[in-house]
Image (tube, coloured by chain):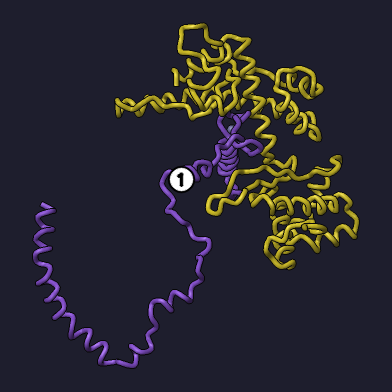
């Protein structure tokens, strides 16, 4: 199928070319003839390239592949916490050298309940 | 190089910073326990100790300096009566900082700053809990489960008095760290506080036994309504009474080293009690 399409376009190519040329001619003509001054001042492609240095530095030569990226990120992940201990009071897990949030909440709830019993305004 | 710069700036001008710290110290003296970020707690604690030293001196110059520092005049009387009396024998170290994880919102390290031996002393409460738990574990090992469930800890005042006199390297009922905390907490307190501590430990041991049963009854109530409710599970890493492995190993469950295989081998008595209370969850 592809080869058939190719031969067809090759056979059509001369007619395509001529129609393209007739379609493009007025556009090119107006650009060149309408503003001749501009076409004179436009620099050529060669002189534009002269503005850049001959070697462009510090640019990756190749796209980083998925494998390379995965290999680079392999040791970038979060580290596991090792400072996890058991609370001596309730046996739950807590951070080492920190107060147990579970015990703290139950202790403060007891204090608040006691205050409420006594009818005093809540503290802190 | 950070030479000769001893204290924190807190991103504030000196007037702003000083007022903030004075405010923190005033709040600490008012409530005896405040929650703030860890660096602020550390700087406020340093100033609070100095002001309490003024309170213990009690002469006119000290009064003048304290009144020029504290922002509430009502705190002055508390400083020169309550605190001066409470810390009369204590050679410094009137404040305590408990780290409290990271703050919700900005993830700043959070801390609780409290006055030592205040009426709502957190270390006192935590020590009472640890003592209750350890004595309960010992009790279950020595007595029958039924007796423990019926009587609880019993009288432990004499036990605590004995623990109070033990040296760090001697072997007692409590773990060395718990005994250390108990001795620290009782150091400048009267003999009545030992009784208070034993009472607290006893109540907490009862709590420890009642909590799983309460959970079980709650679960059964829910299950009566919705029959497919699964059994509640202990949280990962939770240490049961007889457990000796560290939290990270317990959290590995049956894969962790030292996990007992689910065989019909003879279980420890503590485990039997816990299983009886919790019916295997
Ligand atoms: Zn706890």
Residue beneath the point at 41% across and 28% down: B218
Q: Is residue A33 above or below residue B229?
A: below
Residue beneath the point at 33% across and 26% down: B223
Residue beneath the point at 69% across and 35% down: B124
Left or right of residue B111: residue B251? left
Query: Which one is nearer the viewer's eye here, B148 or A86?
Result: A86
Rendering coords of residue A73 (x, y %): 49, 45
Rendering coords of residue A67 (x, y %): 43, 43
Rendering coords of residue B100 (x, y %): 62, 43
Rendering coords of residue B37 (x, y %): 64, 52
Query: Which one is nearer the viewer's eye here, B63 or B246?
Result: B246
Badge 1: chain ID: A
Left or right of residue B38: residue B146? left
Q: For chain A, give the colour.
A: purple
Left or right of residue B58: residue B177? left
Ligand 1 sits in quadrant: top right
Residue A39 lies in quadrant: bottom left
């Amino acid at each position: 199928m592809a080869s058939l399409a190719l031969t067809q376009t090759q056979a059509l190519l001369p007619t395509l070319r001529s129609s393209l040329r007739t379609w493009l001619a007025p556009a090119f003509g107006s650009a060149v003839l309408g503003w001749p001054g501009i076409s004179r001042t436009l620099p050529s492609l060669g002189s534009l390239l002269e503005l850049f240095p001959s070697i462009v530095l510090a640019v990756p030569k190749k796209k980083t592949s998925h494998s390379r990226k995965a290999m680079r990120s392999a040791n970038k992940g979060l580290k596991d916490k090792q400072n996890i201990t058991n609370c001596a009071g309730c046996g739950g897990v807590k951070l080492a050298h920190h107060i147990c949030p579970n015990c703290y909440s139950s202790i403060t709830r007891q204090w608040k309940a006691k205050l409420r019993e006594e009818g005093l305004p809540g503290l802190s | 190089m950070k030479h000769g710069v001893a204290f924190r700036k807190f991103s504030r001008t000196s007037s702003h910073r000083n007022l903030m710290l004075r405010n923190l110290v005033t709040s600490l003296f008012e409530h005896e326990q405040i929650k703030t970020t860890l660096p602020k707690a550390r700087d406020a604690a340093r100033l609070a100790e100095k002001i309490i030293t003024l309170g213990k001196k009690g002469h006119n110059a000290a009064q003048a300096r304290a009144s020029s520092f504290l922002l509430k005049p009502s705190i002055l009387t508390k400083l020169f009566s309550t605190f001066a009396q409470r810390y009369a024998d204590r050679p410094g170290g009137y404040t305590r900082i408990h780290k409290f994880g990271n703050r919700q919102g900005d993830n700043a390290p959070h801390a609780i700053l409290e006055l030592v031996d205040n009426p709502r002393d957190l270390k006192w409460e935590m020590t009472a809990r640890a003592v209750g738990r350890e004595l309960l574990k010992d009790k279950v090992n020595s007595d029958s489960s039924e007796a423990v469930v019926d009587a609880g800890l019993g009288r432990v005042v004499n036990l605590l008095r004995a623990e109070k006199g033990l040296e760090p390297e001697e072997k007692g009922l409590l773990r060395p760290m718990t005994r250390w905390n108990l001795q620290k907490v009782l150091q400048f307190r009267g003999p009545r506080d030992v009784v208070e501590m034993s009472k607290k430990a006893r109540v907490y041991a009862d709590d420890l036994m009642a909590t799983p049963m309460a959970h079980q009854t709650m679960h059964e109530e829910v299950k009566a309504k919705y029959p497919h409710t699964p059994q509640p599970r202990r949280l990962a890493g939770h240490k049961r009474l007889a457990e000796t492995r560290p939290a990270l190993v317990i959290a590995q469950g049956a894969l962790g080293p030292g996990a007992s295989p689910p065989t019909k081998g003879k279980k420890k008595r503590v485990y039997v009690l816990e299983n009886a209370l919790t019916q295997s969850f």
